[in-house]
Amino acid sequence: MSQKVGIFDGHGDVGSNVKPGSATYIPQTQQYVISGAGANVWADHDEFQFVWKKLKGDFILYTRAEFLGNWVDYHRKVGWMIRKSLDGNSPHVNAVEHGDGLTSLQFRRAAGAQTEEHKMKITKANILQLERKGNTYIMRTAAYGQLFTVDSISGLELGDEVYAGLFVGSHNADVLETGVFSNVRISVPAPATLVPYKQYLGSNLELLDVASGNREIIYSVPNSIQAPNWTPDGKNLIYNSEGSIYTFDLANRTPQVLNTGDVKNNNNDHVISFDGKMLGLSSGVQSLGGSIVYTVPITGGVPKQITPIGPSYTHGWSPDGQNLVFTGQRNKEFDIYRVPSKGGKEVRLTTSPGLDDGPEYTPDGKYIYFNSVRSGLMQVWRMKADGSEQEQVTKDSLDNWFPHVSPDGKWIVFISFLPTEVRPDDHPFYKHVYLRLMPITGGEPKVIAYVYGGQGTINTPSWSPDSKRIAFISNTDIIK
């Protein structure tokens, strides 16, 4: 029961005389393939294959789970399990999908007690998340591409240290069933005592394949890294961390500090010119009113100051390299401005009350996409490059930030916050957020990643040059 599998401490069959199962981790795809038998996970005892890790405190479990092959019994199960012990009759809670599509939150309150169940409104879910907050357990589930459906159970005493992991049960003692688990994440969330912008969680630098939804963690650190840009040659990412700018080599997966001279208070609003030769920076200068826009060669050097005062946060270059667009606070109002990339007079492009942010040119230079709170919630908008014909693009119940247009000009990706968790004009760290995709011609946004993150996840353009992948940051208190 102690053989390590991927990020998990061990695996084995729970229950008595269970047909032996198996568990395999595939490093190349970061997937887990688990086979399990057992008469049932129900009633007063359970039989299944369990891949587990010992955890304490609060945590969030996430995966995309799929069955392999045709089923023998429609009650075969794949999902997340949290147990007090490895005994077959242990108290537990699980987030499970059944072979017939039933998706439910199941739990046993005491050893040998009968299992109880909350059936979710959704069926055939393949996105399963189970979060522990003290003695409350929250299940979030979705069919990939859709928003979460949520349920919870409170007052479930499983002890501080628990066994948490993936499980497969066949509902048939003589048959092995197999599940494949992708995008497996264990996140330790921010404690309630965390002081934003002074204390930080660790960071996972991830690459997302847009077509499939497959995610790969390529770099993890115990501190904050934010807002990866993808260089037009496809070879590097550029991100900020603790005031410095880093170039991350995708071939050898190592970072190197980029020389930005005396400009060393860089935040997560940085952007690469379309030709890949220049980098726009935003760096805090207290004596000038906050963040100031600079430009510097992509290879590093002495930055040139562009905006005379702050706060100014740069987000986009025009395709011809002649102009920058940035969010600036002038006269106590945040609006979008254009400024020559070599410095010069600012031109105000938006005038509506409330925050306008995240401006970015389309690859043909005709439009600027941005986000605005003017309709009540934060939504994606666009306007002509001269600021005319401002129109709302998204019109839904979430707060949508930082629209990024794919290099081929066909798609927009943006980050969505839940209005129940944040103010419309705020995009804080360490929240449950979605990365969503929609055609630039319009249509229903589709979730392409379910992320614990927020501020710093995808503030700036992060598409790969072939428009197939996106780089982003997810967060966790790194588990040793």
Image (cartoon, grey):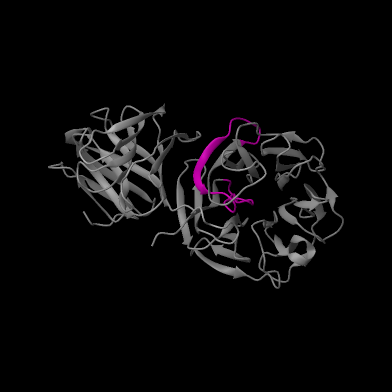
Q: Is residue 25 visible?
A: yes
Residue segment shown in magenta: 439-467
Compared across the picture, whether 412 is left or right of 153 comes to right
Task: Please identify the quarter of the rendering in which residue 239 is found.
Answer: bottom right
**Please, what is the dominant secondary structure of the magenta stretch?**
loop
Name the foreground residue: 478 vs 349.
Answer: 478
Looking at the rendering, in which quadrant would you find the C terminus?
A: bottom left
In the rendered view, does 10 fall on the left or right side of 461?
Answer: left
Which x, y percent locates residue 223? 52, 63
Q: Is residue 271 magenta?
A: no
Residue 338 picture location, percent across and down: 80, 50
Q: Is residue 250 above or below residue 93?
A: below
Which percent across, then down, holds residue 14?
Answer: 20, 44
Say if the magenta span includes residue 452.
yes
Please determine whether, in this image, residue 123 is positioned above or below residue 58.
above
Which of 111/279 is in front? 111
Task: Please state the horizontal and vertical placement of residue 427, each as a whole percent of the image.
Answer: 62, 47
Task: Using residue 286 as the reference point, say whether residue 60 is left or right of it.
Answer: left
The residue sitting at 59% across, 54% down in the picture is 456
- The answer, for residue 129, to whether it is visible in the render is no
Instruction: Give the farthest residue toward the left.
Output: 17
